[in-house]
Amino acid sequence: MIDLMACPICDSQDHAPFAQKDALTVVTCRSCGFVFLAPLPQPGDSTALYDDAYAGTTAGYFAKVDKKMRRSRGRARRLRKLVAGGAPRLLDVGASGGFMVEAAREAGFAPQGIELDPKSVAFARAHYTANDFFHGTVEAYLAAHPDAAETFDIVYCAEVIEHVPDVNAFVAAIALLMKPDGRLYLTTPDIGHWRRPKDVARWDAFDPPAHCLYFDRSSLTRLLAKHGLRILRRDLALKPGLKVLVGKV
């Protein structure tokens, strides 16, 4: 069981209020500066929170499928350049409607998608039938497929980590699934970005309880290091976000 009041980065319970939304309190850890929702949601709460997260796949991320596919194809082509040889394996953690998984297949990857929202999984399976999609968490995928450890050349995780209450179990599972020379491409909102509104309530990424973790470069670096990972490259983000390429230490 995780301690729902402890800082996920340094385990301290010494924190100060950062911001309030409705009855929810987001705090700053006095020891390391990490910003998170306290108490954190129970890990099982994510199942209910992300059951039909996109209004029957008609809203949010599904509103402009063509645009999503264009962006996914561009990222898949760039990631393919990182891996030599035929049919490298790519894992999309938080696959949503399957857009990146399909783009990765087109780019020459052997892809696998993982998604918690059942409606999104149903959409992906119906529209991108050449691919495989696992319904559940990355930890559950690893438990169901122990032979998948150290088999993925690329793990792709876009705008997911900020949603995860037990983020240490989440990152540990990803690290275990990566090959020793594998790469993780990770994106998440950046609370330390110079363009983040001073009034955090005006920032579209400030969304507890859905977003329960708020990273900056330092806190993300520290979390990854706990699990034997390090940032190799940080891509420019004009909007308040982190886009990092990560490898094993």
Image (cartoon, rainbow, N blue to C red):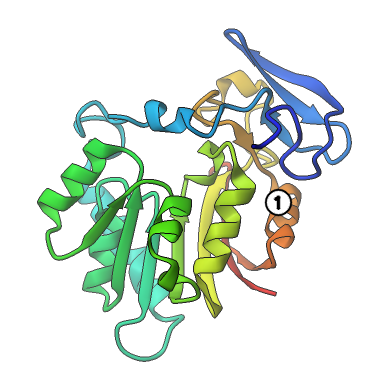
Front-lying residue, 203 or 210? 210
The image shows residue 118 at horizontal and vertical percentages of 26, 38
* Residue drawn 48% across the image and 52% down it: 139
* Residue drawn 24% across the image and 26% down it: 55
Q: Quadrant of the C terminus?
A: bottom right
| Apparent side of residue 146 relative to residue 133 in the rendered image (left or right) | right
- The answer to whether residue 237 shows anywhere in this view is no
Q: Give the image quarter of residue 146.
A: bottom left
| Apparent side of residue 155 relative to residue 212 in the rendered image (left or right) | left
Q: Give the image quarter of residue 143.
A: bottom left
Q: Which residue is mark 1?
A: 217
Q: Give the image quarter of residue 18.
A: top right
Report the residue that reaches farthest toward the bottom: 85
Instruction: Name the element at disc 1.
Output: helix
Q: Local crowd at mark 1 within 10 Å, few (<14), some, or many (≥20)?
A: some
Give the vertical position of 98 relative to 79 (above or below): above
The image shows residue 228 at horizontal and vertical percentages of 69, 67
The image shows residue 93 at horizontal and vertical percentages of 41, 54
Q: Amino acid at mark 1?
A: Arg
* Residue drawn 31% across the image and 38% down it: 117
| Apparent side of residue 166 relative to residue 204 in the rendered image (left or right) | right
